[in-house]
Structure formats: structure tokens, C-alpha cells
Image (tube, rainbow, N blue to C red):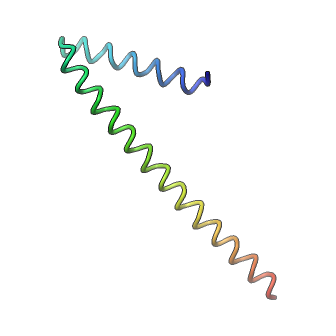
């Protein structure tokens, strides 16, 4: 297992325990945890989309520069 995965699971466990301690209710802690995981997933998708767009933009700029150098 990667260290990042282990830390993610450990953080999830700590967060779950803290929510259970604060709310004193399994259902409330489960609901909050599900919302947090949903938001985390949406943020990960958004970040990946932005990275792909950024890489595509810079790849296009690099190709345009190489074409201009080839035409000179």
C-alpha cells in the first residue's frame, strides 16, 4: 500500500472517531462523514479537470512554438 493511501485511511478513521465523539450519535456522524466524502470526491474531480485543462493549454502553446521555429 502506498503511504498516501494509508494516511488517507488513517485520517478517515480519526475523523470518524472525532465526529462520533462530538455528535454522540452514529447516524449523525455517518451523515456528516458521507457529506465530507462527497465533497472530497467533487473537489478531486474538479482538481483533475483543472490539471488536464492546464496541461492541454501548455501542450498547445509548446506545439505552436515548435511550429513557429520550424517555419523560420
Q: Relative to residue 66, is residue 55 depicted above or below?
A: above
Q: Is residue 69 left or right of residue 25?
A: right
Q: Position of residue 53 (x, y in %)?
A: 52, 61
Q: Quadrant of the N terminus?
A: top right
Q: Relative to residue 16, is residue 48 depicted above or below?
A: below
Q: Nearer the viewer, residue 52 or 18?
A: 52
Q: Position of residue 14 (x, y in %)?
A: 38, 16
Residue under the image location 48 percent in, 25 percent down: 8
Q: Nearer the viewer, residue 41 or 72?
A: 41
Residue under the image location 29 percent in, 29 percent down: 34
Q: Relative to residue 39, is residue 8 depicted above or below?
A: above
Residue under the image location 44 percent in, 47 percent down: 45
Where residue 39 sits, quadrant-wise, is top left
Question: Among all residues in the image, which is located at the extreme bottom?
Answer: 72
Q: How many marks?
A: 0
Q: Nearer the viewer, residue 38 or 59?
A: 38
Where residue 21 sits, quadrant-wise, is top left
Amino acid at each position: 500500500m502506498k503511504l498516501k493511501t494509508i494516511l488517507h485511511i488513517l485520517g478517515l478513521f480519526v475523523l470518524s472517531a472525532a465526529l462520533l465523539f462530538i455528535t454522540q450519535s452514529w447516524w449523525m456522524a455517518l451523515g456528516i462523514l458521507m457529506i465530507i466524502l462527497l465533497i472530497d470526491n467533487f473537489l478531486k474531480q474538479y482538481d483533475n479537470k483543472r490539471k488536464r485543462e492546464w496541461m492541454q493549454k501548455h501542450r498547445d502553446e509548446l506545439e505552436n512554438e515548435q511550429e513557429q521555429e520550424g517555419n523560420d
